[in-house]
Amino acid sequence: MIQWFPGHMHLTQKAIAARVKDIDVVIELLDARLPGSSANPLLAQLTAARPTLKVLNKQDLADPARTAAWLDWYNARPETRAIALDASVAAPARALIDAAQALAPQRGGLARPLRVLICGVPNVGKSTLINTLVGRRMAKTGDEAGITRMEQRILLADDFYLYDTPGMLWPRIAIAHSGYFLAASGAIGRNAYDDEVVALELLAVLRQDYAALLAARFGLGDPADVAARTDDALLADIGRRRGALQAGGRVNLQKAAEVVIGEFRAGTIGRITLETPERFAAWAEAARLADIERERRRAERAARRKGGRGAHRDDSDDLED
């Protein structure tokens, strides 16, 4: 299971907890290709008392039908609105200002400016969005986790204050799929995961849901055959077709994995969304039940250890008698 929570994220958590007391609306930027996995449960706890705008960013890389399903899913929640956009396109990006104002209609004007906190996991496109909103380069951007490292206050209008925060994950990613998908998207630092394992998890979804796209991009033949093959066989075949070979003609699986992950991030395989609301809900429920079982076993072990110590004392007393 993949976990990544460097020290600056702990500081971000504390900063958000302090800032949210003065915030009217929270904008959480999500990756439209993984709208459930890129939603931070820790952030939900920190901002539970505030209306939230979920922005499914990078919609141009995502499956349109699944994006629509996720928008319906988030919009059905109380005190929540959801929109989808591509942060590099100016007109859709401006739509989030109106959406934020609709969540706090009592705020506005110079006397009561709207105070908005924008946050999200690393590498979700937040800096690109901010630069688009202000019309100039305000924030550093890059295709890696951890670019933004400090809070910024940005004046988008005379009565609209936007507080930017560094990308933040959460200390324990309970849903295994989420860890792999976040790694595939670039939200997790490279030292925290194995490229080959992440690529295999990607291929497991792609051959099931997007076999035709996978076959077309890598020249793998009949989509039905692609869907029936193992993930390991697909990764090796992709490596051969892309020239990722070692001495003796053996496939360099590390290089093949980098190809799969890189093409997913760039969107060159096609418009892909790795999860549906129903599938993600099932994963979350399985993780919840696993946590309950883990706690039960831990309590049983503690009880046995305590009982063992008591039995030892009783045996000693019997010997003394």
Image: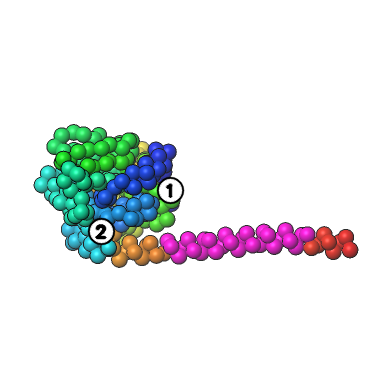
Q: Where is residue 103 in the image (x, y as percent from the top left)?
A: 21, 55
The answer to whether residue 306 is magenta is yes
**How many residues crowd around disc 2 within 10 Å: few (fewer than 14), some, or many (20 or more)?**
some
Instruction: State the residue in front, 191 or 121.
Output: 121
SS state under label 1: loop
Image coordinates for residue 95, horizontal then vertical, percent = 14, 50
Around disc 1, counting alpha carbons within 10 Å, would you say few (fewer than 14), some (14 to 19), or many (20 or more)?
few
Choose top left, top right, bottom left or bottom right for residue 15.
top left
Do callouts 1 and 2 mark residues in contact (Cβ within 8 Å)?
no
Between 163 and 262, the one nearer to me in the picture: 163
Q: Mark 1 points at which residue?
A: 171
Bounds of the magenta segment: 287-313
Residue sitting at x 58%, y 61%: 299
Viewport quadrant of the C terminus = bottom right
In this view, 241 is above or below 229:
above
**Magenta segment includes 102:** no
- Which residue lies under the disc numbered 2? 80
- What kind of residue is marked 1? Pro
Q: In this view, does 231 lie to the left or right of 318?
A: left
Is any atom of residue 285 visible in this view? yes
